[in-house]
Image: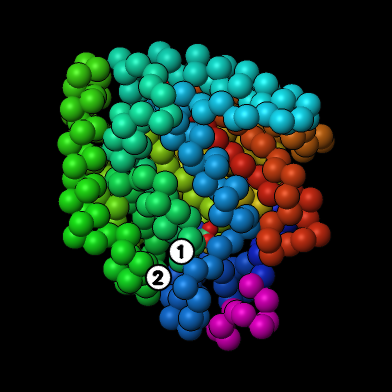
């Protein structure tokens, strides 16, 4: 089997003008993967926010779309003005309907009915959606999620300086003031009540996750044992798994596989794992194949490896597969170069739903 890392593009460079002067071990890629490099990065930079790969609006749009599916909120109807917009809108709606059907049987919100986007129940459900951000960095996405209504989000990074900065920002920018915490608690109670009234089977799980709030903490994504299995409705990362794949200490492939397994374990059934990456689909398919739980491997892994070979030859813009233990794997080439790499054609989006 070819190496997962053979087709990986050059890792992002933070550029001479902006990167802290740190000793690099084995090149930029390897340096980016060490905890001390990142600690130095966050202690030596003064930016309020620093975002990798993509503008925040794009990331937030993807997260909101996945959140709507998780909490069963109907897609708001866009007002289409020209024919191109109409066609896109129609495609989006069909896609959303397809996904709604896909999620109906095993959604964590099983038993919940779909609600209108502008209803108070929709806001309460978003507040209660247990979400985990892996390697949050000092991305502005966290702040935007708060503004958009998330109230139960765990944001982890292995750099203590980064987490301290984000905790400070929370206070300075008043995302978490006493009033906001009280408001979050109110939303949580409303969400729990809404779940109970809809006789949701996962009401207990939702209530348990809701109680934890919008928090930043130090954790290594290779070991998420602090979180129980089947906990999160949404787990996402932008660039973090890429860094783990570049791990210079130990075995990077094993580290990436371990991280994917942890993500799978912590997702609840029906939950979505969202990853923004520089790695092309062939590399990702191989990683997914390796990360399949042992009892689920076998045919699925073989299928994924075949898929990886096909994708290596021809990278289609969106690929969907149904493979145990995932109900669906989506691989999408976003028509945008990463912010750091204008010469690269795509940034990739990977979404996997736990069966
Ligand atoms: C490329 S940056 C992306 C940061 C942020 N997600 C964004 O999009 O702006 C990767 C982040 O992952 C963190 N990271 C890398 N490896 C990690 C690991 N094993 N555990 C936790 N965080 C990690 C780094 O500290 C860094 O903040």
Residue 152: percent from the left, percent from the top? 29, 45
Q: Within 8 Å: ligand 1 and the Cβ of disc 2?
A: yes
- Measure how far apart labels 2 and 1 are at the Cα level: 6 Å
- Residue at 38% over, 22% down: 115
| Earlier sequence position, callout 2 versus callout 1 | 1
**Residue 152, relative to residue 110: is it above or below?**
below
Q: Is residue 240 left or right of residue 71?
A: right
Residue 341 percent across, percent down from the top left: 73, 62
Q: Can residue 89 be seen in this view?
A: yes
Does the residue tagged 1 have its C-beta within 8 Å of any atom of ligand 1? yes
- Say how the picture is coloured: rainbow
User: Residue 149: x and y, percent?
Assistant: 36, 45
What segment is highlighted magenta in the picture? 14-24
Residue that appears at 55% across and 42% down: 61
Whether residue 153 appears in magenta in the rendering, the answer is: no
Give the prevailing secondary structure in the magenta stretch.
Answer: loop
- Horizontal placement of 345 versus 21: left or right? right
Q: Is residue 254 visible?
A: no
Q: Relative to 87, does residue 145 appear above or below in the rendering?
A: below
Mark number displayed over residue 78:
none
For the N terminus, the quadrant is: top right
The residue beneath circle 1 is 137
Q: In which quarter of the image is the C terminus?
A: top left
Q: In this view, does 219 lie above or below 231?
A: below
Label 1 residue SS: loop
**Tag 2 and tag 1, C-beta contact below 8 Å:** yes
Report the residue marked by disc 2.
162
Q: In which quarter of the image is residue 110?
A: top left
């Amino acid at each position: 089997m070819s190496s997962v890392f053979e087709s990986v593009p050059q890792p992002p460079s933070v550029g001479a003008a902006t990167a802290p002067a740190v000793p690099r071990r084995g090149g930029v890629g390897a340096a980016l993967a060490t905890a001390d490099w990142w600690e130095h990065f966050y202690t030596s930079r003064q930016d309020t926010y620093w975002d990798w790969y993509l503008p925040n609006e794009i990331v937030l749009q993807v997260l909101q779309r996945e959140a709507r599916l998780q909490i069963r909120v109907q897609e708001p109807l866009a007002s289409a003005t020209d024919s191109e917009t109409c066609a896109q809108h129609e495609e989006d709606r069909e896609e959303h309907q397809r996904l709604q059907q896909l999620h109906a049987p095993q959604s964590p919100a099983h038993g919940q009915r779909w609600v209108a986007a502008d209803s108070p129940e929709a806001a309460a459900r978003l507040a209660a959606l247990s979400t985990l951000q892996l390697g949050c960095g000092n991305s502005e996405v966290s702040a935007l999620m708060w503004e958009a209504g998330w109230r139960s989000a765990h944001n982890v990074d292995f750099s203590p300086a980064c987490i301290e900065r984000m905790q400070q920002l929370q206070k300075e920018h008043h995302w978490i003031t006493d009033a906001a915490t009280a408001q979050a608690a109110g939303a949580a109670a409303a969400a729990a009540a809404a779940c109970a009234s809809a006789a949701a089977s996962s009401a207990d799980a939702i209530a348990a996750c809701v109680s934890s709030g919008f928090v930043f903490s130090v954790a290594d994504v290779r070991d998420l044992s602090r979180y129980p299995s089947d906990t999160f409705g949404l787990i996402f990362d932008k660039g973090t798994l890429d860094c783990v794949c570049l791990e210079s200490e130990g075995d990077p492939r094993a580290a990436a596989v371990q991280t994917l397994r942890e993500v799978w374990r912590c997702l609840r059934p029906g939950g979505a794992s969202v990853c923004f990456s520089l790695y092309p689909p062939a590399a990702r398919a191989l990683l997914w194949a390796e990360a399949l739980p042992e009892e689920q491997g076998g045919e699925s892994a073989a299928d994924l490896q075949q898929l990886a070979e096909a994708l290596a030859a021809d990278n289609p813009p969106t690929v969907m597969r149904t493979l145990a233990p995932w109900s669906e794997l989506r691989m999408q080439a976003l028509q945008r170069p990463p912010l750091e790499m204008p010469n690269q054609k795509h940034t990739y989006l990977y979404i996997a739903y736990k069966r």
